[in-house]
Amino acid sequence: MGRLDGKVAIVTGAAQGTGAAIARLFVGEGARVALADVRDAQGEALARELGANADFIHLDVTRAEDWQAGVARTSERFGGVDVLVNNAAILLLAPLTQISREDFLRIVEVNQLGPFLGIQAVFETMKRRGGGSIVNIASTDGIKGMNGVSAYASSKWGVRGLTKSAAMELGRHAIRVNAICPEAGNPNMSAPFMPGNPDLSEVPHRMMQAILKSPPHVGPESRVLDVARMALFLASDESLSCTAADFVVDAGLTAGQFQKLAPSA
Ligand SMILES: NC(=O)c1ccc[n+]([C@@H]2O[C@H](COP(=O)([O-])OP(=O)(O)OC[C@H]3O[C@@H](n4cnc5c(N)ncnc54)[C@H](O)[C@@H]3O)[C@@H](O)[C@H]2O)c1
């Protein structure tokens, strides 16, 4: 028996990275999944690989008409929508003083408006089906600050506010809304902003500076899988009393600073 048997999910940004891991895990746990993305070739290839319980939909999360068409197609093909994972996002790493109005708005449009439009789009079908679960992928940059991410962090803090407000409004329809704040994702999301566009998948991630040391047998891909497993928990009926909450998956990165001069075990 799968943990998502009978459920239908839309996962945005599912062509690669965290979204692909979530889609893969969901199908493995018995869900029928619409993989939504703007990367058509990658998304279609993954949907083909995952089989008859997966469907690729071209969906730009900033376009309300794409949301309408995507939800309609998913409802026709799979009968409705029980789970929405708002995962699609873009990153901008730049000094605050060099971010244009257009660039700032583009980040907010994809990362913050996108999930908002998604919640609006799935509301009626979830309500008709007696409830649902919406999982918004925020970030540890939505909990703290960091240099270089003023636009991105603004959007991710916004996602957490949206999560709590939407949970307040939709709870009476048995729709739960939660946020996941991961530290890790596709390591190459930040590569285009680094000198020389390095392949960061081989570089020890900044998670290594977190308080929790990974056992030696645990590789970088397990960090993304942990995010996917948290999404699975929140999508499933194992978390029926969880709503309006942030679920931090960061190996303790945001817990505080380790003071080397103070005593420690
Ligand atoms: N990469 C990290 O280190 C990291 C850390 C914390 C949180 N996150 C978050 O995890 C989530 C997944 O990111 P990832 O690391 O897998 O990065 P990624 O770049 O591999 O995946 C993002 C996906 O979103 C898609 N996308 C972008 N714009 C879109 C749009 N307008 N409409 C539909 N799809 C669109 C992309 O095509 C891509 O497939 C994001 O919300 C990101 O902010 C990432």
Image (cartoon, helix red, strand yellow):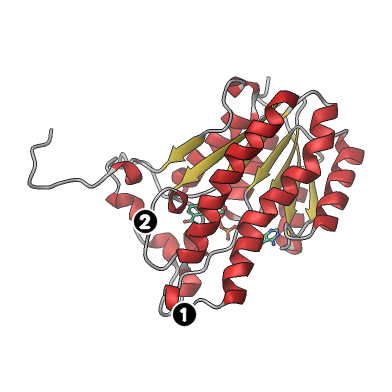
Badge count = 2
Residue 83: quarter of image: top right
User: On the rendered structure, is 141 left or right of 18?
Assistant: left
On the rendered image, what quadrant is the N terminus found in?
Answer: top right
**Residue at the image point whose x is 36% and y is 62% from the top:** 203
> Is disc 2 placed on a helix, strand or loop?
loop
Residue 79: quarter of image: top right
Q: Are marks 1 and 2 in contact (CB under 8 Å)?
A: no
Residue 30 place in picture, x, y as percent: 72, 29
Give, as a three-letter code, the residue at label 1.
Answer: Gln
Frontmost residue, 251 versus 151: 151
Badge 2 residue CB within 8 Å of ligand 1: yes
C-alpha separation, residue under disc 1 versus residue under disc 2 = 26 Å
Frontmost residue, 98 versus 86: 98
Numbered circle sitting on residue 205? 2
**Residue at the image point whose x is 36% and y is 56% from the top:** 205
Frontmost residue, 160 versus 198: 160
**Residue at the image point whose x is 79% and y is 37% from the top:** 123
Sequence-first disc among 1 and 2: 1
Residue 32: quarter of image: top right
Whether residue 245 is visible here, answered yes or no, is: yes
On the rendered image, what quadrant is the C terminus found in?
Answer: top left
Numbered circle sitting on residue 98? 1
Is 108 placed above or below 216 here? below
Is 94 placed above or below 19 here? below
* Label 2 crowd (10 A; few <14 / some 14-19 / many >=20): some
Badge 1 residue CB within 8 Å of ligand 1: no
Is 151 placed above or below 241 here? below
Is 11 placed above or below 241 here? below
Residue 77 place in picture, x, y as percent: 89, 40
> Is disc 1 placed on a helix, strand or loop?
helix
Residue 131 place in picture, x, y as percent: 75, 26
